[in-house]
Image (cartoon, grey):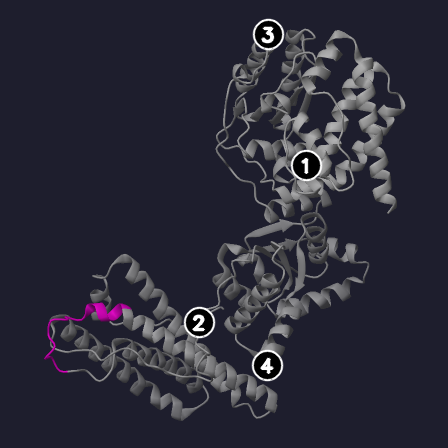
Amino acid sequence: MAQNFPPLILPPGLLQAVTGLRDKDRRRLDDTVARLHSVNGRLWDTEDRVRGALLTAAQVADCKREIDQLNAERNALAERADEVLEALADAGRADAPLHTETLASVVDRLSVLTLRIWHSERAAVRNELARRRVPTLYRQREELCAALDTLVADILVGRRRLPSPARYKLYGREDAAVTEVRPSRRLGRVIAVGGLSECGKSTSAEFLRRACGAQRLKIGFLLRQAAHRQGLADPYALSARRQAELLLTELNRFAEAHVVTRLFTIESVHDDASVTELKRLMGDTLQIVYLDAPFDVRAERSGMPAQAVAAKDEIKMSRGAHQVAALADHVIDNSGSITALRARLRRIAAPPVTGALRITTPYGLGLPAAVASATADFTDALRAYGPGIQLVALTGSPGEGAWIAGWSDLDLLVVAGHEATGRVHKALDRYRTALDGAADLGPTLVSPGELTARCLTPRLAFALYQLQQGRPVLHAAPDVELPRVTRDELALAAVRELPQVVLTMRRLRADARPEALRQLYKHLVLACRLLLREHDQWESGPDRILAAACRVPGLAAFSVPPLAEVSTIWRDGGSETALKSVTAAVDRLLAWYAAQLAA
């Protein structure tokens, strides 16, 4: 909440004394005293507001509840300050005279006196009596500061003792202890979307819901729900801090009831004061996104008359909507393409990570000498291009150490900036020439931006998942950023990829000649891998995957020879024998799949 009253200035003697405290205690004291002064300011404002002659009974009740809550917070902060300040006292003088109040109580009085001076000076413009009181109030503050410094000096040398700081205040029920609201451990990332009218807030939140699984929530809905639970008639009449506490309490409640959801969006952020307080409570768990676009762009997109958009802007700006930009973690220019907007939103929803990848040489992947040598030359050529090349890796069977000559492909992943594409193409041409038909090369070229924006195909997502699980890479730049891929994401990707794999497998089966054995077998393994993944069964290696397929409900075991036998038959040109068992397994899987979808 923006502070609209003067800061609390402590007297020099106290300031000098606290310099002897530990850094941690000094920071804790600074924060506590600043919050105590802020609470006193809010308490003053609320007590002024409750005296309004036009307030309804419900509004008076709301103000009374807020006053009670602020008083409880005031006492808790004073106790916290005394816990630090009592370290200044000389504990060895038990016979010293006891002072009537603690240091924090005096600081609290100084805070109230500072506010009284400020309010009196404002009233003095129109009130003669208030004007006459101002010099007396300044004299009282000077005397109080001098008395506080004297007390500090006395307790430092043991001439005075301080009373126990415990206040034992009770507000409401005995179990209604005042505690600071903190984000629940179930509450994942929260994205608060703000901006002026027709800037794209709803469009952005809906994209995060569809593409990233976010739960969309409205700030107004959360406040009304929280107010209903606590018997508040008008939550918007509460202080910004209290509104933020109500919002976080309701977010925590929602997260505890929906433990699978890890991403939330809240719209629309029109009040800069309450979102400032919410950020203080939540820290980096809350990411504030401000969408910016010129007025003419917003008016054209809205389909409404320009004056209607301007009127909506005026209402939002009166609440501080335009000031959210200065508080935002991310300011997005939404006057460009929807592709750029979505890329930014994906990065915010799931930030990329910089992790230590396991780097190896091609000679440690079980490749034939000629293939390993060609791969090493290719890797060295790309590495020499500098920072434009972020990552080089062989995925699939080479990454698993299960590459079979004459059967396995070289599935290559290269992450490189678009400006390096021409050089990568030339290096690939030399790589193919050096392989001289020893293996089929299947390159996947992707830019760093595509990865961090999570524009991932299911197969690319699985390859990245394997790398973060420890599969080796051939080259990785020190600052390479990769998206974190979870098992849940792979299970969802399997749902999207399986239909295409089944269609391809059905096409291959329709033309099941001996030369189709290799592709038909690989698609059978891939389909089984995806089915197992949907059932939370994670197997690697073709033989293990085909053997585990019978765990899928209703799918009988396959009678397919081991991969070593199938690949040998393939290389020796006797594919008819293996083809019969593979096509029988494919037919069984396709029949099962059709029956499941017809159920």
Residue 497 image point, x, y percent: 75, 36
Distance from Cα at disc 4 to Cα at disc 3: 76 Å
Residue type marked 4: Leu
* Quadrant of residue 192 within the rendered picture: bottom right
Q: Is mark 1 on a helix, strand or loop?
A: loop
The residue tagged 3 is 370
Judge whether residue 39 can be spotted in this image.
yes
Residue at left 32%, top 75%? 79
Distance from Cα at disc 2 to Cα at disc 3: 68 Å
Q: Earlier in the sequence, mark 2 or mark 4?
A: 2
Residue 21 badge: none
Q: Which of marks 4 and 3 is nearer the N terminus?
A: 4
The residue tagged 1 is 456
Q: Is mark 2 on a helix, strand or loop?
A: loop
Whether residue 90 is in magenta: the answer is yes
Query: Which of the pair 317/381 is nearer the observer?
Result: 381
Residue 596 image point, x, y percent: 83, 43
Query: Which of the pair 113/564 is nearer the observer?
Result: 564
Q: Earlier in the sequence, mark 4 or mark 1?
A: 4
Residue at left 79%, top 32%? 501
Residue at left 44%, top 71%? 179
Q: Earlier in the sequence, mark 2 or mark 3?
A: 2
**Can you say whether 119 is above or below 502 in the image?**
below
For the record, the magenta segment spans: 84-97
The residue tagged 2 is 179
Residue type marked 2: Thr
Neighbour class for label 3 at 10 Å: few (<14), some, many (≥20)?
A: few
The residue tagged 4 is 232
